Image (spheres, rainbow, N blue to C red):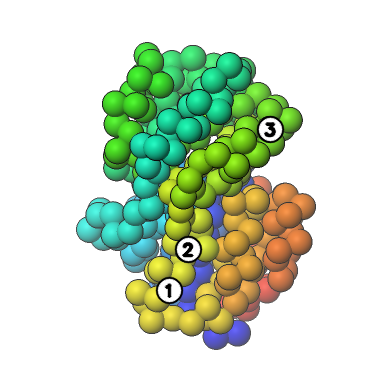
Amino acid sequence: MSIKCIALDLDRTTLDETGQLSAENKRTLEALIAKGIEIVIASGRAYATLPNDVMAIQGIRYAVCGNGASVYDVTAGQCIRRCGLSGEALETVLRVTAGETVSYEGFIDGVAYAGREYVENPVKYGATPQAVAYVQSTRHIKEDIVAFLREHKEHLDSMDVIVRDEESKQRIWKRVAETAKDVYITSSVEQLLEIAGQGAGKKAGVEYVANKLGLRREELAAFGDGDNDIDMLQYAGVGIAMENASAGCKAAADYLTKHHAKDGITYGVREILRLLP
């Protein structure tokens, strides 16, 4: 396989069950970069919330963030592509979700903001216990998140609607899709409905980076675990899903690798892509 670039989802893919980059996966990424292979972050996370242990790796040049809502030049710390959410779309989402038991997150210039009620008790809104530390350490608390979103509605990278169950998420998803204009909607985990501007998506972000690097899709491999990774895995020349991936993600992949808690990235690089001995 003539793979020259690998796009990596982070949570439940590259990171372990504690949200850290394992020593084995770190060695693998460093070895790939030393071999001249581009490593591109492709995450639902906002830029400012990308983990330090990943960002400290020398040689990572690009990061697709917010499910493709923005693309960053890591070396310069600058956003080079943005598919922001319009103020009109925000108002539609708020109108559609009025009366629902939800909370919200907003992302502006790569920074994450959320309501106090969610940050102080993420589990109440369906977050796993393992995700609590991540949420509480990366979100800037706003007492009135709705007012904050409206105040900054012309500058939003993207937003999340935080729901409590799958039924609510699907109902709200359908309503937003039917009424909001020019939006991209996806979901990485059960409690989040993630909304950005039209033109977002991990596939679009990774394709932008590949074109910038002068690479064909056949020269790209991608790893992921969630439904928000599906279009990226389908676009890549080689799409690899984790053992712990969603059914949709597995169906979209060309190969399956080991569980993210068992260094599935390293296994995929060595045993599937055969890029390292």
Q: At 59% across and 43% down in the image, what residue appears?
A: 177
Which mark's residue is nearer the viewer, 3 or 2? 3
Disc sitting over residue 204 in the figure: 2
Image side of residue 192 versus residue 58, left or right: right
- Give coordinates of residue 72: x percent, y percent: 33, 56
Specify the quadrant of the image occupied by residue 115: top left
Q: Is residue 262 above or below residue 116?
A: below
- Give coordinates of residue 259: x percent, y percent: 70, 53
Which mark's residue is nearer the viewer, 1 or 2? 2
**Label 3 with label 2: CB-CB less than 8 Å:** no
Disc sitting over residue 210 in the figure: 1
Residue closer to the observer: 233 or 274: 233
Q: At 28% across and 54% down in the image, what residue appears?
A: 79
Between the C-alphas of marks 3 and 2, the distance is 26 Å
Residue closer to the observer: 197 or 70: 197
Q: What residue type is labelled 2?
A: Ala
- Give coordinates of residue 25: x percent, y percent: 54, 58
Callout 2 secondary element: helix
Quadrant where the C terminus sits is bottom right
Specify the quadrant of the image occupied by residue 40: bottom left
Which mark's residue is nearer the viewer, 3 or 1? 3
Disc sitting over residue 171 in the figure: 3
* Sequence-first tag of 3 and 2: 3
Q: At 52% across and 63% down in the image, what residue appears?
A: 203
